[in-house]
Each structure stands twice: as C-alpha cells, then as structure tokens.
Image: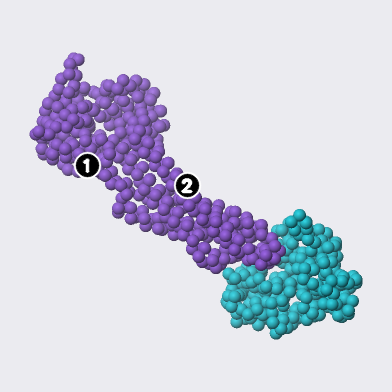
Chain colours: A purple, B cyan
Amino acid sequence: MRLLVHLALRSLLRSRLAFGLLVAAVTAGVCFQIPNAANLAGYTEELLRQGMERMTGHLQVVARDGKAVEGVAAMLARLERQGGLRAVVPRLIHGGVAFKGSEHQPVRIQGIDPGAEERATGFCRRLGRGRCMRAEAGAAPEAVLGASLAARLKVGVGDRVKVLIPYQELGEVEHSSAYYRVSGVLEGGGAFTTDADLFLALPLLRRVVGAEDAASIVSIYLHDHAEAGRRAAELRPLLPRLEVKPWWEVSQFVASAIAGNRAIYGVSMAMVVAAVMIPVSALLFILVLHERRQIAILGALGFSRPALFGIYMWKAALVGLIGVGLGSALGYGLCRYFMLRPIFEFSGFVVRPALNLEVFAVPSLALFTVTLLSGLVPALRAARCEPAVGLRED
Amino acid sequence: MLFLAAHVSRSFPQGDDSLTALDDVTLIVREHEYVAIAGPSGGGKSTLLNVLGLLDGEFSGHLEFRNQKVHGLSARERAALRLAGIGIVFQRFHLLPMLDVRDNVALPNWRLHGARRRARARAEELLAQMKLGHRLRHDPSRLSGGEMQRVAIARALVNDPPVLLADEPTGNLDASNTRAVLRIFDELAEAGRTLVVISHNPEVVTRAKRVLVLHHGKVTVDVPVGQIMEPRFNPWSTLSGTQPPREGA
C-alpha cells in the first residue's frame, strides 16, 4: 500500500497544476459547505430557542373548544409527577388596550408566573431593562412590556401605563381599567410576537378577569425538542379532555422554517457535490488519459490491474484528504468570521454559526466520499489499460 | 525450458478485416540462451516480444513460461509472473518521469517484496554496476539516451529475473552507447542470464548465439548466429520480400 501511495503522490506532484486544481475544487466545496451548514444549523437553533424554548414550549396543552383550561393547579400537580419534564408553565392570555398619555396600543396581555417562566425560559434574565414584575399578593400592580410595545408607547422602566382589559361576567362584557408600573422591558424576540406583548403576573390577571384557576395554555418544556412527539403521545391519556400539541403543531412557522432549512441544506449539499464531482472526475479522467504511457509502463513492470486501480484511487483519496483538510480549516475560519459578523441579526434574533462536530463532519465526509467516487471511473479506466496497447500508442 | 510457444498466432482487428501479426509461431527458448529476433519492420517482432513478455494475453495457441502454461492466465496472474520472472527493456526506455533514477530502478523490487529500503539498496547496487551511481537522485529527463537505457536495464534486472527481453534496445542510441549496452548484454549472457533481443541492427543481432527471423508473422529462420550471414538466411538480404526457407536451429 505504501508503494501505491508513493506512486500516487509522486504522480500528482508531477502534474502540479492539475493537482492544484483538484485540491482547489474539493477545498472550495468543503469550505463553502461547512459555514453554510453551520449557519443553517445556527438558524435552526435560534428558531428553536426563540420560537420554542422562549415561547411556545415543546408541548402545549390547550382546551379543545378554544376556551381557557380550567383546574390548572390539579393539572400542574399531575404533570409534575411525570418524569422528564423540564418545566410546566401556565399562561393566561387576554386581549386589551394599553394607554400612555395620548398613545394607545391594542395588546396581547400574557399573565405569567415569573418564577416558573424564569426556570423555563429565563424570562427575567432576558429583560433588557428593569426587573420582573412582583407576583406576591399585595404588591403594587406591575407590568413588563415587550420592547417594541414600550417603544410605541414611549414608556420606560418606572413609567405607568393604563391598561384596559375586557372580560365577560354573567354574559355581559365588562372591563377593568387600571394603572400598572412598568417594572421591566423585554428585549426583542426577533419576528416573534412577545416583542409587542404586555406581561402581568398571572394571579393578578386571573383576579382581574375572574378566572382563578384558569390558563389559556400550559406550556411544557422538555430537555430535548426531539422528544416532543413521544412525550405528547404519553401525556394525551393523562389529559383526555385537553389537547396536547407538539411544538410543530403549535408553531407552524418554526416547523416550516426548520423544514426549509433542511431543504436548503440538502439542495446546497447536492450543488456542492455536483460542483466537486464533475471537475474532479473530469480532471482525474484527463490525467488517466494523459498518463496512459506511465500506466502501461507500470503494467509492463508487473503492476496488476488492482494495483493500478489502487494507485488512481489513492490519487483521489490524497486529493480528498488534502482538500478536506484545507477546506475544513478555511471553513472554520469563515465560521469564526460569521460568529463576529452574523449573517442575520434583527431585534434580538441573531443567526450565528453552530460550531459542532456534525457541521464539520458531514460536509467533510460527504465530499471526501464524493472525491473517492469521482476517482472510481478514472481508476477503472487506468486498471483496464493493456500494457501492450499503451506502449504501442506511444 | 524457459519459453515454449507452439502454434502461437495473434491478429489485430482492422475494421471489418484483421491483421495477422503472428502466424502459427512455434519456438523454444532454453535457459541461458542468448537469442536475437530479427526481421523487417511489421514482421511481428514486437508482437512476439509482447506475447513472450506476457504483456499480451490475447493470442491463440500454446505458451509456457518456465513450464507454466500462460494461455488462459488472468491479467493479474500474468502481471505477477512478469514482475518476478521477466525483465523487459524497451527501445524508448520508458522510465517513469515522476520518479528519480533510483526509484525507477527500485520500483519492481519494491512492488515484489514490499520493502522500500531493500529495493533502494538493490537499485543503488545495480546503478553502481551500470556506472550510474552519481545519478541516483536525478530526474530521468536529465539523463542522456545511453544513461537512460542503462537505467532501464538496471530496472529490468532489479528482481533478478531469469530472462531479459529487449525490444530494439539500441534503436535510439548512438554507436558508442550501442556498444556499451551490448557489452552489458554480453556480460549478462556470460553470467547465465537468458536474453531475447529484438533488433534489425546486424551489430546487435550478431552478438547473440542464436538468431530467429520473423517475416510476415512467421519464423522463417532459426539458426545459430554463425549461419545468419549466409545468403540463404541473411535477413538483411531478404527484406525485399522473398520468403526464405525455414531452417531449424
């Protein structure tokens, strides 16, 4: 084998331009695809983080009739007895209008349990300004505003906003109108709607709208988003009158965007494979034609067809190894560049390359395999060279 | 017996027709013989060398190399036999441009035994014998024709094969280098190596002990070298076309 590698390397070094072009083709493919894969993986991670881990949860429990879920305390107790759930978070959602001076905005009001939200989504740590609202009984009414809502109302931490909340009582539409001190501003969640929401402590909102043990949704957070389907199936029998939805049914945008990412990755990989395979196989084939005399000489000296095949496969392997090595190094450099200068950044939604083994290993292994496959036909052609014919052609 | 060829024929397709390069050739080459094969261009000399050198397996008839039947062997088996048992020297040297002189010579030995150091040591020894010890690391393209042919001879001998086949070994050499190559052949023959040399150069042919003449793919003359210049056998006088009678050696 060492001899075959030696001959392959010497032969490649003899044709430096072709060798350089071969390595350049593989290097370009790898160094394009690694940051591409890393950015797409980073985009998927950010979608999951912003859209699911910060918002909907991996599973969502809702009432089948679209109304509020009742008996939440008992349900939470039942769910907490289940193993493997990272957090269970009830939320009560109401429409309302927020006023500040002459400014007013229709808002989605979320009643949240700040402690549970903090454990599940790091809600309080994500506040760009101020702190979480107080939830204990007797505390002054406080609100957290999404950053874009705060900007539209032109309010900051410490300001007071008036919030009008309609609700039904005995079949009549009533409304509550009260002032809330802004305790914090939630920094943006990209294109996600929390940016324009107004958050109140859950017990407070429950009292206001007269729904003491109710929640609009109960979000369940898991340790791994890939577990969502299985856990949803396990929880459904426990909650027969409710609907347990995995995240891709709750947030079809996130699901579609992730599926889109996969498609883009597949298409880009196919393009890179074609962009590497065509020139590499063509160049290797041209090399075989160009080196027919050398192949015939090797055959005449006693190199068997498998040995000749081996030499040309080693050529492809050396090109692949060098190309993948250089491409990985350059790809890593580009990833570092995109870490510093993200390809997408909007309102806290930042796409940075995900640097993990998979984003390096998959393109590298795929393009190394492609390079080997590209060498197959040229190597077979070399192995089929008849020494007597090759020497006569000279 | 080194080579036994019986009724060996080889044709090449030429459109709808075929060209017969060897036509029912029967010959024996014994161990330690020094045989020259002469004849006009297109007479089938190189085709016969390709068949004897196991480079061409597409012939019909019966061929044995060292009592082993060759016809029907796979390309891989023929390559293995060739590697260990047959050294070939070509008119155009056919050195590998990507290797230096030493590795050109060492290559068949490295392939046979799988030991680079040993192969290089053997190559250095042979190149020293060929008075090329100072050219070990040189690129083959920097050598003169005579030097290249001596490297090719060293390469053919590196596995110590029992037979050396040479196809017009002096065809590209000047008189001085021709004499140097022939001296090497003489020494090899004296040392007991079997040589089969193809040439139409009388100076080369007459150094052998036995001469075969191939004409239109047939062995028309097979005589000791002492008789080759007799008018009825002399190939250089029969090149104009009339086929001389076949005589046994």
State how far apart marks 1 and 2 are (Cα): 39 Å
Q: Say which chain tag 1 marks.
A: A
Give above or below for B125 relative to A253.
below
Residue displayed at 57% across by 63% down: A8
Quadrant (top left, top right, bottom left, bottom right) of the C terminus of chain A? bottom right
Residue B86: quarter of image? bottom right
Q: Amino acid at mark 1?
A: Glu
Give above or below for A63 relative to A377.
above
Viewer-nearest of discs 1 and 2: 2
Residue B238 drawn at (x, y percent)? 85, 74
Residue B54 drawn at (x, y percent)? 75, 63
Query: What residue is pinned by disc 1?
Result: A187
Q: Residue furthest top?
A: A170
Foreground: A181 or A99? A99
Quadrant (top left, top right, bottom left, bottom right) of the N terminus of chain A? bottom right
Query: What residue is pinned by disc 2?
Result: A270
Q: Amino acid at mark 2?
A: Ala
Specify few, some or many for label 2: CA neighbours under 10 Å numbering under 14, 14-19, or 20 or more. few
Q: Residue furthest bottom?
A: B176
Residue A102: quarter of image? top left
Residue B53: quarter of image? bottom right
